[in-house]
Image (spheres, rainbow, N blue to C red):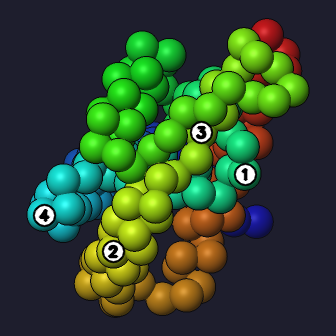
Amino acid sequence: MPRTLRSLSQPSTSRSGRGFGYQVVRLAELVMAHGEKALAPLGLTPRAFEAMNCIANGHGMSQQDLSRKLGLYAPQMVSLIDGLEQRGLVKRHISPTDRRRHVLSLAPNGKELLKSATKIAENLELELFSSVTVDDMARFAELIGRLEALEKQDEVAE
């Protein structure tokens, strides 16, 4: 039977004495810091890049849908979209099926910038994770999937 945190009398820690959750957060912070540095020449943040990616793949995604997907509060989302719209990267349209809803799309400039940003992000991922095996990535993705499933169970229970 595999060892889990529940099967241990003491939570698992690394050589640094920090728990697994701390290490996951630290990994995210490191990736974000590298992402900020890599995307800065394009005038993008990792959050703006992710928003543009979601919009490009969302086919009529609303601000509210995007807000939920990125885990941002409405005021944060409005500010983010305002900035992208002012730069001519994103367009807001009133939904043809619900006039109360704003649907987002990438402007032509946004599509071009997203292509460049995607290349940068792909190169950064190769640079940061070239020593991580495919099996390790699959295990990590499986772990994230289990944690997300627990979060969904908690949401349903509330």
Q: Amino acid at mark 3?
A: Leu
Q: Which residue is mark 3?
A: 104
Q: CA gap, disc 4 to disc 3?
A: 24 Å
| Discs 4, 3 touching: Cβ within 8 Å | no
Name the foreground residue: 83 vs 130. Answer: 83
Q: Which residue is mark 4?
A: 41
Q: Secondary structure at mark 2?
A: helix
Q: Amino acid at mark 2?
A: Ser
Residue drawn at x 56%, y 66% is 140
Upstream in the sequence, badge 4 or badge 3?
4
Q: Quadrant for residue 124, please give it.
A: bottom left
Measuring from the top left, give residue 146's x and y in whole percent: 71, 50
Q: Which residue is mark 2?
A: 116
Residue 3 visible to the viewer: no
Crowd class of label 4 (few under 14; some 14 to 19; many from 20; radius 10 Å):
few
- The answer to whether 57 is drawn above or below residue 84 in the figure is below
Upstream in the sequence, badge 2 or badge 1?
1
Q: CA gap, disc 3 to disc 2?
A: 20 Å
